[in-house]
Amino acid sequence: MTVTPDTADATDTPDAADTPHAADTPDLSFLDAPGLTAAFVEETRPRAHGAGLDPYEYARVTAALTSLHDWPSACRAAGRRHAEAAGRAEAEGRTVTAGTGYRAAARWFHFACLLPHPDRAAAARAATEADEAMRRALALLEPDARRVEGEGFAGWLRRPRAAVAGGLPVVLVVPGTDSGKEEFHAVAEALLARGLAVLAIDGPGQGVLAAVSTQEPDYHRIVARALDALDADAGLDLDRVAVIGLSLGGHHAAKAAAHEPRVRAAALVSGPYRLDWDGLVPFVTATLAQRCGGLDAARAFARRIDLTALAPTITTPLLVVEGGQDGIPGVTPATALAEHAPDAELLLVPHGNHLLGTALADWLPATADWLATRLAADGTPGDRG
């Protein structure tokens, strides 16, 4: 059965004119397949670890699930518990505890949005809750963080705590199909620790923008707008810009490296080289359909995810990070990009899964160092401990 969130109201029901035709709506019956709930919980465990969720809390939250229809409400309940505790701490002046609690809440609210769940209104509320919780966390823990938004993007610019001489290099963090700016906190922390400013964004069809926009295959245009929005920001060196993209964001990072002249380097983590719609599993096609505006739009989007012709033209330095255990049907991994782009390096972690949550120590420090080195004025990593 579908759980109706306790905060639902009449405004969550779409007008008939806004409802996609049944033929263009994904079949979500696979969510009821026997054994899928347990498989999804286990498959998502490394991703939760990589995103910073406490593994024991993840086990407690997911232990009682008997249907994936209940996943969003379980994650939102966990997010609300953290947000309420953070609110009490904030009222008592315990700033660090409050900020840490809001940050945990943001991650849980984001995880409520991962599924191609039929209740898209609830997903939109959870994404808004994640965005607000992250705002409150940064206001307490990093008050100099700045909201940056414009046409097709919204995110946060964060700066390293340690003083840095001269203008700060900037790394743009690009999420994937069902991800958002609240997920890759470990990535941002690794970059900040090396003296790099970080702009983590939601783009079209992602995070807080998923309810009001659809996914964009020409994501380099979004990257360009985000960088344009930083022009007036004092203390940034926009001659030293890099992009790190995760999952589908890896494809977007490669296109940004090809088309955006301000991008000096790009790292691709579990990024696709090409998508084959007919080979994709229902979970992925349903997710794309919801994020792209229907099945037909998703098929057209998938056809555009192909770096075959572009790869030989990308002269920007690339680092392709792949897990040897990452094998999503219908997805050609970006290892092919490492073979065909002129200045590409491959970091292959044999025991890594998709997004390498099973192998953080084997890729994240090295990738952060690689980016810092490419952006350093003297060519050395900016490790600040």
Image: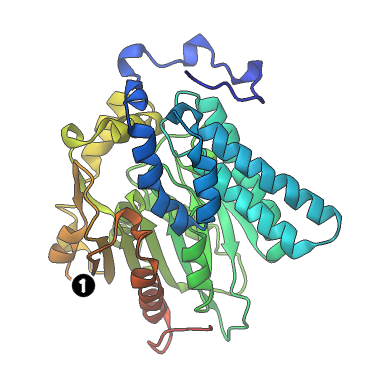
Picture quadrant where residue 305 is located: top left
Q: Residue 2's x, y, as percent?
A: 49, 20
How many labels, in total?
A: 1
Q: Is residue 88 visible?
A: yes
Identify which residue, 339 or 236, lies in the foreground. 339
User: Against 232, is 24 above or below?
Assistant: above
Picture quadrant where residue 46 is located: bottom left
Q: Residue 8's x, y, as percent?
A: 64, 22
How many C-alpha atoms fall within 10 Å of the one at disc 1: few (<14), some, or many (≥20)? Answer: some
Residue at position x 54%, y 45% in the image = 60
Identify which residue, 80 or 180, lies in the foreground. 80
The amino acid marked with disc number 1 is: Asp
Residue position marked by numbered label 1 in the rendering: 343
Residue that lies at the very extreme toward the top in this rendered image: 16
User: Against 80, is 315 above or below?
Assistant: below
Residue at position x 55%, y 39% in the image = 75
Q: Is residue 237 visible?
A: no
Is residue 348 found left or right of 235 in the rendered image? left
Is residue 260 found left or right of 109 in the rendered image? left
Q: Residue 313's x, y, as percent?
A: 18, 62
Q: Secondary structure at mark 1?
A: loop
Q: Residue 188's x, y, as percent?
A: 50, 65
